[in-house]
Image: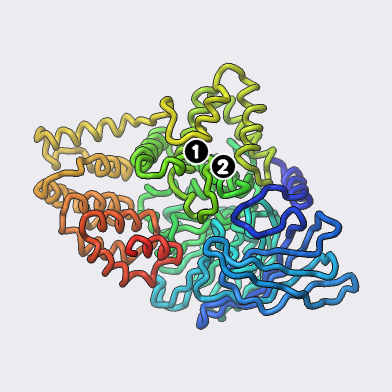
Amino acid sequence: MKLNTIFAALLLSQSAVVVAQDQHSYANLDQVHSTHVYLDVAINFNKKELEGFIEHTLSWHNKQAKQLILDTRDLEIDKVMYKGADKLWHPAKFTLAARNDVKGSKLTINLKEQAKLVRVYYNSLPQASGLQWLTPEQTASKTQPFVYSQSQAIHARSWMPIQDTPAMRVTYNARIQTPKDVRAVMSADNKDAQFKDGDFHFDMPQAIPPYLIAFGAGNLEYQQMSHQTAIYAEPTILAAAVAEFDDTQAMIDKTNKMYGEYAWGRYDLLMLPPSFPFGGMENPRLSFITPTVVAGDKSLVSLIAHELAHSWSGNLVTNATWEDLWLNEGFTSYVENRIMEEVYGRDRALMEQSLESAGLKKLLPTLPEGDTILNLKLNGRDPDDAFSSVPYIKGQLFLIYLEQHFGRDKFDVFVKQYFHDFSFKSLTTKEFVTYLESNLINKYPNIVSMDKVNEWIYQPGLPADAPNPVSDTFDKVNANSQAWLAGQATLSSLPTDQWTVHEWLHFINTLPRDLSLAQMTELDGAFKLTQSGNAEIAFAWFMLAVGNGYNEIYPALDKHLSGIGRRKLIVPLYKTLIAHDKKQWANAVYQKARNTYHPLAQGTIDALFQ
């Protein structure tokens, strides 16, 4: 879309009254909402705290309202000030309610007039769920401490008092003060971050939901990859990351042609320490990335395609509540795969579809039926519970279903128009269904019924006619695997030297779960799987080996669990270890590694050992 169209949508989104109700926020959006925030904080690594203030620019919707309600969790509030009609700052009365385990503490601010500006002076606490503090020894370079934020879903409130809901959007400015040798970066314009002076200023002129306000600070260096992309990383991984992700500009260029012009200016990457609990986080202008995808052969760069895709689905068009998460993640997974097809070819894209679909089918029987519905009902549960492969892959398969039935030519036009029409806005599943019915289902009648749409979105599991991605390449892997299992071929005769990572993952994931120790030993001896340097292959092998009682893996498995914090690659292993009578060993490893894990990973794994 054209730049003037983008900013027109931006202005509209900031002036519109926010009406979506979010069960996970205390914010009184029907009365007032922030249109802009200014964050001014100092990082105290010794205390593991942020200290300073946040200033809210307010838009009032009720002429009689004089109360502002913000979300907080584990924050200490020093004072609240508002700027009156007399242009002077005045103290405001406030109440910080008791802590709710999910939503945190409601901060109620009572004002004497409808102020346009309100400042909350506060400090975060070391246990903030949205921050991870690392000592120099816990970083790759071992020279400077590191801190970063992870605010999705409702963790922004643990490090700043804010209306913490994706139903509203804000622009922001920030000032972050750090020790002199620490560089700070944010999900914003990072021009000022080029100079390490301990005093950094940032500007984000486009309105984003609060969970996308993000920062990182540590021993970060910078290297340009293209006119639009660069990487911030610790020196030890910078060159490898640049080599791994230098196709990012090509991904942007291809997506621009498919779905409209990239709306955010730059697209840079921040490489985080191995403790980062996710593969990536789509913070606009600066995606946060795990080092576990630096494989040396670009085999795992679909993660970059995924975070980039969020620049359209999620960041530009956002789910209004966390029960609508599939609108973010289903569309993003679909666009990710289209990007991979454009840049790396149909065969690779189809293999990735097949792997993800197979993983979803294994997961579905293990979930409560209600958690297999796209428009999930959380009923007060922590929105972190919404994050499974259901919104991602079931959502993707639904969109593939529509593409297959309407044809890619018609469906691409629909998706591009959807991103345009809802740019810089948040919407609910109900609003999407209405839009889908008007702009696709009724526009091309007698192709897909609304009953089928409702089955996909509101019913559990997968429809009987759901797409079943099949890769011819995997058929060949299956044939080789069966030949070995049947004793008709040796491992050395298999054409594994030509296999991609995806073929390796399919091979390991589809091996029987009851292989003999002799077979496991043969596999490991032939392919050195226990010592694999690819985190995804190692994970798949460890999952197979634990279930088959292959004990040779345990020194390497200890290193794997102690060396990374990505939940996808550690939580299932802890669960499998517990299920196979290795709980005591797993707990010993966890207690050793726990302090290096992010609070989100700690919370998940703590529950396994209770």
Numbered marks: total: 2
Residue situated in front as seen by the camera: 308 or 68? 68
Whole-number angstrom distance, CA of label 2 to CA of label 1: 8 Å
Query: Relative to 414, is 237 on the left or the right?
Result: left
Q: In what quadrant of the picture does the C terminus appear?
A: bottom left
Report helix, strand or loop for mark 2. Answer: helix
Judged from this view, the residue extending furthest toward the top is: 446
Residue 148 shows in the view = no
Instruction: Please report the residue visible at 58 percent of the width from the left and 63 percent of the height from the top.
Output: 156
Judging by the rendered image, the residue that carries numbered circle 1 is 395
Residue 463: horizontal and vertical position, in percent? 44, 29
Q: Nearer the viewer, residue 232 or 425?
A: 425
Residues packed near mark 1 inside 10 Å, few (<14), some (14 to 19) or many (20 plus): many
Is residue 281 positioned above or below 190 on the image? Answer: above
Residue 385: image x %, image y %?
Answer: 47, 52
Q: Who comes first in sequence, dot 2 or dot 1? A: 2
Q: Is residue 10 above or below residue 88?
A: above
Q: Residue at x 33, y 65 (%)?
A: 563
Amino acid at dot 2: Leu
At label 1, the amino acid type is Gly
Q: How is the image coloured?
A: rainbow
Above or below 483: residue 36: below
- Verify CB contact (< 8 Å) between mark 2 and mark 1: yes
The residue pinned by badge 2 equals 327
Say which element carries label 1.
helix
